[in-house]
Image (cartoon, helix red, strand yellow):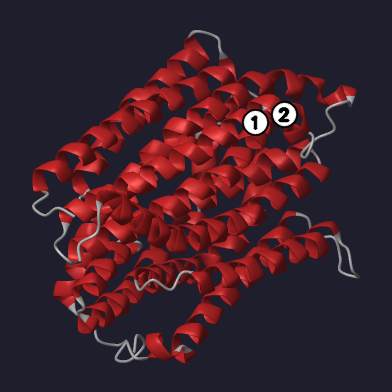
């Protein structure tokens, strides 16, 4: 008996939620570490907040770029799972772990010499010294973070998302406790400042990776895939396919996070107060945006699974379920941010303290623009996830370059530096780029999925 359109929509939404809720919850939990880091940095002083925030966004930008490449595992595993091809799942997972190691090495080297780049961007000597203290430790967490991203993509592609949430929540709680103990010198530990925050983070990253390895080795169904057998064998055809799918995703992630990173560096050129205000806005948005990011991962998996079954009409519906879910959530969050801005900002700084008056004046217009822009950013992210599920990654990469950098960064620079809008202009410019990307991605998914559909519910 075939399902009616309304029944198929309800079924798709239910299956989508089984993936989206754990994946989005895991993303929120993981981002909570950065949120707590920022709060602790604020307690350590404005200079530490500015430098630590700059270092953190640099690490996140590089990690997101490298993770984007290995996340190319996700659509391939989802497609193989949908097609019922267990051997291909095994092969893709193993090559993904190889790719994690290969990606980690050059990024670690780059982070070890990041102070040279910071000087070129005109950062203050104190900011560079504090940031390098943090990053020299954090670079040792790159491999476990990338390997975890690979295994997370494999496990979620096999529709086992809930354990990921449990592991990430556990790792996050450990990280937060470590931040409190090592960063501020509580529970009998010495106060290590930014070094303590970094040590807590890399211990958490290794713990999450090893926990997920243990889960895949012990779970009855996942154990049958034998993901860790013959790891020494590099299968070049599959590795090449993974790179061809993953590199455009990684480049797209680099273009997106790179935009925010460069804007952060430009904020630093406008002064410590502007940079501190920007860090508060950015960290708030990062935490909230983890929900659409998790929704995007779930959308990629659901579209990829239907694609593996050669049912493009179902894949199209799965894509729109994910897109609409992201828009609804971010609309609610935008309203909340616009109604309660003082309460949110008060989590980071004392809004009644006279010494914070300048930061508060700078932050309010940034906060308003960022809140509204996140609605369109959710469209951009979830729609790109739907395109990835169709293994369409190269054209979205080109679109990201044109919109984020050609339009967003250029507009932001002109508004911020030439029209005197400062940090507000930078936020407005990058938001314009994201909004245009959202519209183009949505148009492409609509046209591509419609033209390729050949079956109906």
Q: Quarter-wise, where is residue 285 in the image?
A: top right
- Which residue is more in the foreground, 121 or 444? 444
- Identify the residue at the far top of this view: 419
Q: Dot 2 corresponds to which residue? A: 340
- Res. 36 in view: yes
* Quadrant containing the N terminus in the rendered view: bottom left
- Identify the residue at the far front of this view: 1
- Res. 257 in view: no
Q: Dot 1 corresponds to which residue? A: 337
Secondary structure beneath label 1: helix
Left or right: residue 298 versus residue 359 is left
- Within-10-Å neighbours for mark 2: few <14, some 14–19, many 20+: few
- Which residue is more in the foreground, 375 or 259? 375
**Residue depicted at 52% across the width and 41% down the height:** 329
- Which residue is more in the foreground, 220 or 122? 220
Secondary structure beneath label 2: loop
- Up the image or down, 132 lies above or below 269; here it is below
Left or right: residue 21 versus residue 452 is right
């Amino acid at each position: 008996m075939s399902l009616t359109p309304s029944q198929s929509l309800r079924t798709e939404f239910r299956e989508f939620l089984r993936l989206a809720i754990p994946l989005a919850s895991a993303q929120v939990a993981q981002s909570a570490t950065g949120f707590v880091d920022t709060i602790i940095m604020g307690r350590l002083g404005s200079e530490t907040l500015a430098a630590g925030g700059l270092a953190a966004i640099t690490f996140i930008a590089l990690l997101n770029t490298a993770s984007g490449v290995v996340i190319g595992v996700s659509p391939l595993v989802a497609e193989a799972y949908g097609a019922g091809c267990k051997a291909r799942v095994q092969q893709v997972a193993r090559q993904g772990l190889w790719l994690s190691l290969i990606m980690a090495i050059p990024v670690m080297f780059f982070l070890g010499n990041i102070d040279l780049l910071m000087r070129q961007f005109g950062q203050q000597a104190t900011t560079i010294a504090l940031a390098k203290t943090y990053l020299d430790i954090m670079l040792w967490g790159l491999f476990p973070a990338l390997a975890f991203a690979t295994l997370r993509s494999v496990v979620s592609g096999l529709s086992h998302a809930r354990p990921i949430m449990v592991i990430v929540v556990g790792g996050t709680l450990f990280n937060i406790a470590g931040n409190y103990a090592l960063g501020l010198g509580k529970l009998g530990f010495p106060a290590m400042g930014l070094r303590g925050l970094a040590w807590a983070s890399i211990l958490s990253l290794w713990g999450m990776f090893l926990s997920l390895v243990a889960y895949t080795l012990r779970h009855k169904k996942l154990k049958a895939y034998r993901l860790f057998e013959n790891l020494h064998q590099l299968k070049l055809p599959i590795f090449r396919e993974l790179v061809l799918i993953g590199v455009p995703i990684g480049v797209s992630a680099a273009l997106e996070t790179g935009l925010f990173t460069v804007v952060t560096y430009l904020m630093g050129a406008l002064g410590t107060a502007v940079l501190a205000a920007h860090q508060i806005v950015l960290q708030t948005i990062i935490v909230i945006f983890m929900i659409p990011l998790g929704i995007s991962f779930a959308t990629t998996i659901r579209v990829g699974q239907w694609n593996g079954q050669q049912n493009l009409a179902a894949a199209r519906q799965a894509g729109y379920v994910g897109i609409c879910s992201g828009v609804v959530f971010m609309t609610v969050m935008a309203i909340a941010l616009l109604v309660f801005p003082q309460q949110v900002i008060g989590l980071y700084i004392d809004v009644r303290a006279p010494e914070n008056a300048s930061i508060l004046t700078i932050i309010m217009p940034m906060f308003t623009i960022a809140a509204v822009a996140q609605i369109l950013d959710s469209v951009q992210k979830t729609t790109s996830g739907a395109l990835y599920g169709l293994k369409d990654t190269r054209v979205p990469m080109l679109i990201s370059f044109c919109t984020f950098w050609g339009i967003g960064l250029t507009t932001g620079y002109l508004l911020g530096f030439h029209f005197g809008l400062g940090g507000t202009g930078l936020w407005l410019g990058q938001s314009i780029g994201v909004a245009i990307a959202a519209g183009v991605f949505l148009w492409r998914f609509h046209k591509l999925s419609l033209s390729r559909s050949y079956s109906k519910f």
